[in-house]
Structure formats: C-alpha cells, structure tokens
Image: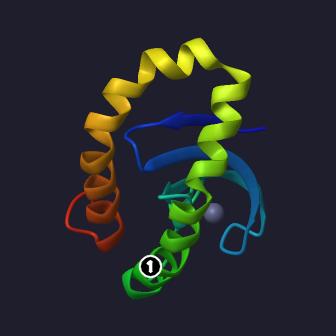
Amino acid sequence: MFRQSRLSSGILEQNTYLWCPTCQTESRHHVHYVAGLLHWLQCERCLQRWDVKRVLLASAYCRMLPSRIATKPVRVTLEVRSHPLRFAASLPRRVLTKPLRLVDEAVDVVGLAHQ
Ligand SMILES: [Zn+2]
C-alpha cells in the first residue's frame, strides 16, 4: 500500500512498506523520486535515510533525457487520440510551461534546490 503525491513537475513522493535493514522488520518508508528516478528513501520508524549520490542521479538523468525527448511525439499522439479535447485545452499552458518544467526538473536532479 502506498500514497502518492506529486509536489512539482519533477518530484514524486510515495509511501510504501519495505524491509528496513536497520529495524530488521518491514516498515513504512517514504520514497522520493525526481524526474522519475529514485532520489532517496527513509524509514519512518527509525528515520534511517538512504540517498542516491547526486553524480549517479545526474548521470542517469542525462542518459534518460534523449529517450524521453525521442518518445515525446509518440506519447503526445497517444494522448491526442485518447483525450483530444483535454489535450487541446491544455496545450497552450503546456507549451508555455514545458521549458520551465524541464529547467525545474534539472535543478532538482543536480540538487540546487530541495536538499
Ligand atoms: Zn528502519
């Protein structure tokens, strides 16, 4: 069981039950993703936190970004076919905010914010 919440364009937080090596039991963990990549997770029982090294996160992001860009036309086409009116209504805002969302995501990945 987990709760999912999206804080900004590139950050996703979930709660889930995982085995904690410190507590030696299954306990609820807070899992933090940035740009779809695991950023850190924390046991809510003992508060032990595990962080993914920034250099590894940035490296994974740089490897992932070209494929995200390459698959965007396919994803947009699928969205147009499944929800044409919703897509048309959201398009102006999305076109205007996409560059800002990408910058925000990159800032999150390299750790200039949200330490
Ligand atoms: Zn623990």
- Residue placed under numbered mark 1 in the picture: 62
Q: Give me the residue at 40% from left, 43% from top.
A: 9
Please provide percent x and percent y for residue 6.
48, 37
Circle 1 residues within 10 Å: few <14, some 14–19, many ≥20: few
Q: Can you tell which quarter of the image residue 64 is in? A: bottom right
Q: Quadrant of the N terminus?
A: top right
Q: Nearer the viewer, residue 108 or 29?
A: 108
Coordinates of residue 93 in the picture (x, y in percent): 32, 26
Residue positioned 44% across, 79% down in the render: 62
Q: Which residue lies at the image location 57% right of the left edge and 12% below the top edge?
A: 85
Residue 12, visible in the rendered structure:
yes
Taking 8 as reference, is 43 left or right? right
- Position of residue 12 relative to residue 113, above or below, is above
Query: Relative to 21, does residue 36 appear above or below in the rendering?
Result: above
State which quadrant residue 97 falls in: top left
Type of amino acid at the residue the image marks with label 1: Cys
Q: Residue at x 35, y 57 (%)?
A: 105
Query: Quadrant location of the C terminus?
Result: bottom left
Position of 32 with respect to 26 (left or right) is left
* Ligand 1 has an atom within 8 Å of the beta carbon of the residue at disc 1: no
Does the rendering let one see residue 40? no
Q: Looking at this view, is 42 or 89 the one in front?
A: 89
Q: Is residue 10 above or below residue 1?
A: below
Asked if residue 111 lies left or right of residue 30, the reply is left
* Image x and y of residue 71, in percent: 62, 59
